[in-house]
Amino acid sequence: MNSTEIRILLLRAHVTQASIAKQLGVTLGFVNQIIMGRRNTMRVREAIAKAVGRRVEDLWPSEPSKKAA
């Protein structure tokens, strides 16, 4: 999926990037970078996927799934 599609899923789920950022203790910009594919942090990706009811692999299929150290 591309970043626009992920944002649409968040909107449909009534979840904001800001709420995910607050929940995880990261910045809104950091969450945005994850969605844009500029960063790869599984903890944030998992939170986004859970919020929209999808698997991480569904949202970022071209990225290998790795647990962040």
Image (cartoon, rainbow, N blue to C red):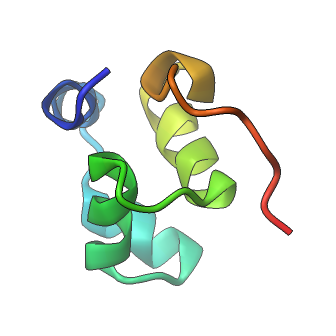
* Quadrant, the N terminus: top left
Q: Residue at x 44, y 25 (%)?
A: 59
Rendered residue at 67%/58% (across/down):
43
Q: Is residue 55 visible?
A: no
Q: Is residue 46 visible?
A: yes
- Left or right, 61 with respect to 29, comes to right
Residue 37, image x, y percentages:
36, 48
Q: Is residue 69 above or below residue 40?
A: below
Residue drawn at x 57%, y 34% as measured from the top left? 50
Q: Nearer the viewer, residue 11 or 57?
A: 57
Quarter location, residue 18: bottom left
Give me the residue at 60% from left, 60% from top. 41
Quadrant in which the C terminus is drawn: bottom right
User: In the drawing, does residue 66 fall left or right of residue 42?
Assistant: right
Judged left or right of residue 57, residue 36 is left
Judging depth in this view, the residue of 23 and 1 nearest the camera is: 1
Give the image location of residue 56, x and y in percent: 59, 29
Give coordinates of residue 66: x percent, y percent. Answer: 78, 44
Count of numbered circles on the image: 0
Answer above or below: position of 68 versus 14: below
- Above or below, comparing residue 35 to residue 2 in the picture: below
Location of residue 47 in the rendering, given as x and y in whole percent from the top left corner = 57, 48
